[in-house]
Image (cartoon, helix red, strand yellow):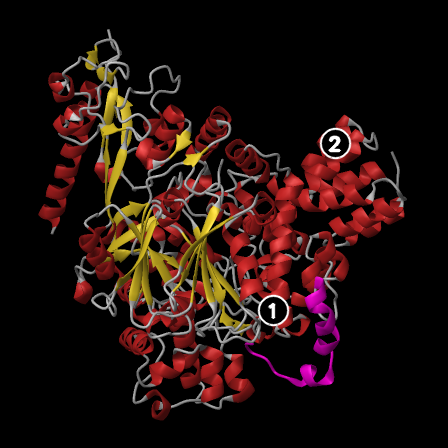
Amino acid sequence: MYGWAGQRLRVDLTTGKITKEPLSYEYRRKWIGGRGFNSDVIYNEVPPNLDPYDPRARVCFGVGPVSGSAAPSTGRVTVAAKSPLTGGFGDSNMGGHWGAEVKYAGYDQIIIQGRAKKPVYIWIDDDKVEIRDAGHIWGKYPRDADQMIKEELGDEDIHIMLIGPAGENMVRFACTFNDVWRAAGRTGTGGVIGSKNLKAIATRGSGTVKVADPKKLMDVCNRLRQAFKNDPMKMGLYEFGSLCLINVANRDGWFPWKNFQEGAHPLASNMAGETHAETVLKHREGCYACPICCGRFTQIRDGKYAGEEFGGPEYEHAVPTGPRCGIIEDANDIWHNACLTNDYGMDGIECGGVISTAMEWYEKGLITTKETGGLELEWGNAEVVAKLIEMIAKREGFGNILADGADRAADKLGLGDEGHYYTITTRGMTLPGDDPRGLGFGYGLSFSVGTRGGCDHLRSLCCLELSGALYPGLNTKILGDESACKPVTINSKPYMVYYEENQKAMTDCLNVCCFTTHWSYAVLTPDQVEYLNAITGLDFTEEEFQEVGERIYNLERAYWNRLMSGAREDTVPERFLKEPMPQGVDYQTNVGVTFPLNDMLSKYYQYRDWDAKTGFPSERKLKQLGLDYVAKDLAPMRTKYMSETEKKKKKWYV
Amino acid sequence: MSNGKVLLFNHEKCAGCRSCVVGCSLYHDGECGKVVSRVAVVRNERYGESFPVGCDACADAPCAAVCPTGACAMDFEAGITKIDADKCIGCKECAMACPFGAINMHYKTGKAFKCDLCEGREEGPVCADWCPGGAITYETPGVSFKIKRREKLTERLQAAKVGEEG
Amino acid sequence: MAVMTKAQAKKFNEMTDKMIDVLNYLKSNKVINADEQRSVLLKGFSKLVDLLQEKKVINAKEAKAAMKGGFESLLVSLS
């Protein structure tokens, strides 16, 4: 079989049963792989009202037909589960090399269900799969657990998916890793894995990806690799990592300062990629088959954390437990806090988010040292942030309240609407470091309708408004409107978000890195169709490619609709709608801006063919995408959503 | 006479991406995977270290010296040893003799296979062509070592200057 | 070829996001059919330009201008 391995692996940790399920051509053509396979399984096998930590819940790891091939950046894995943080559909994507290894071992997807009686890890050695005792590695940091498993199995060249202590403690935003440092950060998949008493999946694969037309694939890959050599985004990312964004973010006013009170700070460049490269960069890192290599390995060289080292950080990982908490003077504090969230195994975005929210509650007098157990949550207090990261991971004291996410914490503390104003969430999930008053109006629109809980930059990753300006003519080619390349304009943003969401969803099925197709635009949809067909021997067209993305997006949306989440929840945190951006630095470009959601949302519904009142996909659209069964599921829900009872419910998460 | 160019591996610039590995496998075998690649990357995930490993084109090659059938022999025009699969008996002596672990046994034939500098490829070896960080380069050693001497000297002079000022 | 009035083109130009509106208009005026509308929606502006050139609604020069000037240029050619 070309491209795909042709089967998925299902492990039931309650019974110990291991099955290999063949995947038919029809199934593979409809869902492709990666995120597509995952979304289908979650929709069908994880009922709307199931507790995400219930043993019957699933966690899925999906790779696609292109994974492990020579196309650019093919190591990625999508991890999906019903999210413990939001209660809705959740997934996250991680780089590294484990994805390629899973493919080489002979699987397109791994599904874990049930719960082991005591901590275990799974060892996949090609077609041999066993469940092994993990008592000795439970509680260990990923960097230690990874080493111990490699020594136990006698092979330092295997690749391992694993969780940290926070996942074991079922922190609602615990994350999943592979190769120690590569994180699938968002939506709390680490906690679902931990709830199953699973610590790791170690994998060795000696197979290969078979290619239908090797010469054609070689030609396409040669062409794309040449394009990357002089690509402006590749050069920025390779040199400075995603931290190359800091100075841009500061100028354009989307740098998250003090829980998004402001969007710029005079000292922002302390943590810029350029500064990082001169002071603490130990090594540049690349995921499997990647021409960009934006990964970092950091080693702190002076101060009280001298000697501390870790893989990362990314922009989104570093800013939440850094400037979002008011920390910017000493960059080593920021690197140290990022190292902590890695070692404990938590989403840096959500962790920093809930801490900065608590800091703003403290600032506004909504909570005092009574609630925090004596901790003084002053902005910029790096030691308190580090302490809270530890307390959250261990579910101790005030940390135990924060470990359930900002909206649940607000409810638990009885803080009412005012408390929720500062949680900066949509559907229970917080914003990454991209203030929509700066980056940008397209990003902000996609936060409001994101299918893994809103406030998510990666559902559309509409970089046509970020790096689009580096590719003159690209916005014209796709949208017919070059002015869309500016972040702070509504021009063509509804169409941009619609297009980019479909593109991204299919990219997540293949499963290749979206930095090659969003951010860097060295690879466009026609290129992907070319390499997909060269590998699989099939005849995908550009339409079918984008349509698969549209299908998956609508399926994920329907998952939320079944949970009574729709148009009423399609919004962004009020701060961005109400508070004009203040001036943080004199060269800031977006002073006075507020985010104009309603100028764009109804247009977006038209593109999506979603009912404007409910925000549910129309029956016509669902049938067009081969989702008749979904249309049936949603039929009784439409009226229920518009009922007076539902309208009255204030829903932060489902 | 060979053009004198060989592959040089600089682990300081290696990001561990394995673009070299996957490109090599596709170019030579028409399928993608580490097991059919003539170049490898060793990674220490925990410490952020990676090392590209390939054929160093030894002038006095141990792999050729130990081969019982003459299957592995120096191709003086190419400047590198090559393995003739027809003559190879799969004894693994060359793989054991290579100081770098650059020779492996092929899963389909059980015979040894190794780097051939992508003979015939216009752009030169795939690994050097695709490497994003310049960790694998295809060049004449004499030229490369002159550049390296100058780079290292510059580094030492910079460090001395900083030492003086500090 | 003119498939809309200058007044209509002006209305479109004033919209901040116009892809779906222009496509709906072209479909209801039978310049493109439903399948073609869907294809453009999925593939983007350059596909609209290609399609209109194929149908000889615009010529090569106008297509080239549209790829440079976007909707602003295309609407001039269509009105």
Q: Is residue C38 left or right of residue A309?
A: right
The residue to which callout 2 is attached is C63
Q: Residue A364 bears which disc, if any? A: none
Q: Residue furthest bottom?
A: A370
Under mark 1, the amino acid is Trp
Front residue of A319 and A27: A27
Count numbered badges in the picture.
2
Q: Is residue A104 left or right of residue A446?
A: left
Front residue of C32 and A622: A622
- Residue A397 screen position, x and y as percent: 32, 86
Say which residue appears at 33% left-offset and 77% top-offset: A392
Q: As displayed, is residue A82 above or below residue A505?
A: below
The residue to which callout 1 is attached is A560
Q: Is residue B84 left or right of residue A88?
A: left
- Residue A144 screen position, x and y as percent: 21, 61
Q: State yes or no: residue A187 in magenta.
A: no
Tell me where the magenta segment starts and ends, as one range: A631-654
Q: Residues within 10 Å of mark 1 (few under 14, many from 20)?
A: many
Q: Is residue A27 left or right of residue C69?
A: left
What is the CA distance from the residue labelled 1 to the residue labelled 2? 42 Å
Mark 1 and mark 2 on one chain: no
Q: State yes or no: residue A639 in magenta.
A: yes
